Image (cartoon, coloured by chain):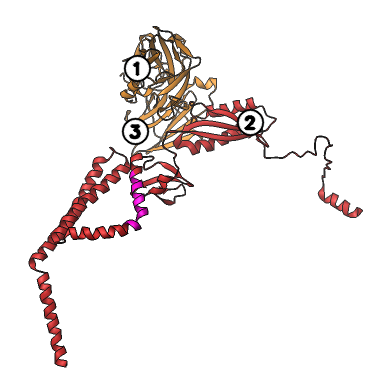
Amino acid sequence: MEQFLNSLGPQLWDAFSSSLTKMISTKKLFAFSRGILLLFIGYILAKLASKFINKLLQNRVSQHHQKLFTRVSFYLVMLLFVVSGLNEMGFQLSVLLGAAGIFSVAIGFASQTSASNLISGIFLLGERPFEVGDFIRVGATAGQVLSIDLLSVKLRTPENLYVRIPNETLIKSELINLSKFPIRRLELKIGIAYKEDIRKARSVLMRVAQDYPFVLEEPKPEVVIQALGASSVDLSFTMWTQSRKYSATSDMMYELVKEALDRENIEIPFPHVSVYAGSSTGALPIRVVSDVAASLTEGTTKS
Amino acid sequence: MAALPEITSTSDLNAGWWGNIKIAQDQTILFRIGPLDLSITRTPNEFLVHTKRVEQQQENLTRCSFDFDARPLDGGSSERCIFRETPDNITLMPALADRWVVSQPSDPLFITPDEEVMLYISSIIWVRLFTRNGSVLLRDVPVIRPSDTWYPPNNPLDGQLCYSARTAARLNPALLPRRPFRAVTPLKIKNKSSITLPIERVAIPVPSLAIYHTATGQLVTQSVDAMSVERERGKSVVEVDLGKRPTNALGETTKLAEARGGDRNVILRAFDAFFE
C-alpha cells in the first residue's frame, strides 16, 4: 500500500506536467504575449486618441459634448484592440458572443434602470436643456451642473453638497434652468398701509429702481397692485436684472426700498387684526393700566 | 494721433484734462471730474488708487481739477498695484463705454420720409489711468456708472446688455452743454422709406467708436450714419455705417484714442434693432 501511494504521486505529477506542456507550447505562449502586448498598446493609443479629440474639440463644442466624444473615442479604440488582443490569444469570439447573448438577457432585466438612464442621457444630449456650468433646479434640488455623464448629472448645491441626479429623473421631471438667459425678472412683494397714498408709493419705488444701476432701464420696472390684503395693500414690484446678479440685486433692492419708504414715512404694516363688536353695538370698554404692579396690589388690598 | 500734453499745476484744463503727469515718491495726486474723485498715491513698490463718487448735484457736474498735493481719499473703493519699482509717470486718458449705449430722447422723435437729420447724442466717459508711458493699465472707471439696460427691450431671449442714457438729441452742436466727462456722437439718420420713422430709442455701438477732441477740449467721436430703407411695403430695415471722422460741424478735431474694439459684424447685424 505504501509503495502504491509513493508511486502515485510522481505519476500524477508526470501526467499533470505533460498536459501542461501540451497546453503551454511555445507557440501559444508567444500568441498570449502578443495578445497582452496588443491590449497594452491599445490602452496607450486609446489614451492618446482621447487626448487628441479633447484638444481638437476644445472651444469648438460645449464642455459636455467634448467630454462625451473624448470618452467615446477612448472606448472605441480600446474595444478594437481588446477584440484583436483576445483574438490573438486564441479566444473564439463567436463563442464569447454567444455566451454574452445568454448573459445579456439576464443583465437586461437587471439593468433596466441603467439602460433607461443611458437612453435618457442620449436624449438630453440631443435636447440640451442645460450645459455644464448652468444653475438648474430639479424638484427641490438646485445647484450648478458639474458634469453630464452617461447615467446621471452631477450638481453642486449652494451649500457645497454633491448631488447625483439620474438622467431618467431629469427626462421625467420639470427642470428649471436658472441661467439659460442672460436677464431675469425679479419680483419684490411689498405691503403698504391702507392709509398711504398708492401713487406716492409707486413713485418712490420707481425712483429706487431708476437709481440702482443693476436694475435694467428696459424692460421697464413695474409696480402693480396685487391685492387689498388683510393687513396691507399688497404691491408686486417687478424689475429685470442680469441673471448672474439676481441674488445681489434682490437683496439690495429690498434694503433700498425699505430705506426709501422709511424716508418718505410710508408705513410697511405688520400683520394686524381690528376687532369690532359689530356695527350696531358700542365700542368695547378698555381700561389703560399704567402701573400693573400698583393695580394688582390695590386689587388684593380691596378684596 | 497727437502726442499727449504734460499736465502740471498750471495747465489749462479747459483745453482737456488728459495727458501725462509726473508723480514723485509718496506723492498723492487727486483728480476730480464731475462726481468722480480719483486719487493716486505712489510709494516705492505700489500705486494706491482710490475712487469715490460724490452726490450728483449741479455744482459737482462741472468739476474738473487736479490737486497735486492731496491726501488719499477716505471711503470709496481702493486698489493696490504692485511693482518692483514704481515708475515716475502716470497717464490719464478718456475712453468710451465698454458696451453699446441705448439713448432715449427726452421726447420721441419722428423723421418724415425722404428727410435727413444730424443728431448730437452724448455718452458718459470712462477715465483710464495708465503708467509706464501708457503701456500698463491701472484703472478703468466710469465717471458716472450708467444704468444697465437690455436691447431690444421686447426680446428678453435674444439681445444684448447695454448702458442706458437719456439724451436731448440736439440738432445744433453749438447748444451742446460743456461737460468734461461726456463725449458727443454725431448721428446722421436718413429716412429713405415711405413711412415716417419714429425714434424712441437708439442703440449706439460705442465700443467701436474712436475718440477725438476739439480745439476747445470737447470730447467727440466719429460719426454714425444710419439709413432706413424700405424693403417691403410698410416694412423697413436700417443700414448702419461708421463714419471715418467726426462731422465737420464740430470743427477741427484730433484723434485721442482708438476704439475699445467692437465686432463690426455686430454693427452690421443691428439692422432691424438699431431703432425702436
The numbered mark 3 sits on a residue in which chain?
B
Q: Amino acid at mark 2?
A: Arg
Is residue B181 visible in this depiction of the protein? no
Q: Nearer the viewer, mark 1 or mark 2?
A: 1
Secondary structure, mark 3, is loop
Start and end of the magenta stretch?
A108-122
Is residue A203 visible in this depiction of the protein? yes
Residue B31 is a magenta residue: no
Q: Position of residue B189 (x, y in %)?
A: 39, 12
Residue A112 is a magenta residue: yes
- Name chain A's colour: red
Specify the quadrant that holds the N terminus of chain B: top left
Chain shown in orange: B
Crowding at mark 2 (Cα within 10 Å: few <14, some 14-19, many 20+): few
Q: Amino acid at mark 1?
A: Val
Secondary structure, mark 1, is strand
Q: Residue at x 11, y 62 (%)?
A: A31
Magenta stretch prevailing secondary structure:
helix
Disc tally is: 3
Q: Which residue is mark 2?
A: A263
Give whichever of A283, B261 is nearer the camera: A283
The residues bearing labels 1 and 3 have C-alpha atoms spaced at a distance of 43 Å
* Residue, far right: A302
Give whichever of A164, B107 is nearer the camera: A164
Q: Which residue is mark 1?
A: B240
Q: Which residue is mark 3?
A: B87
Q: Residue at x 68, y 37 (%)?
A: A231
Give whichever of A92, A256 is nearer the camera: A92
Q: Residue at x 32, y 40 (%)?
A: A62
The numbered mark 2 sits on a residue in which chain?
A
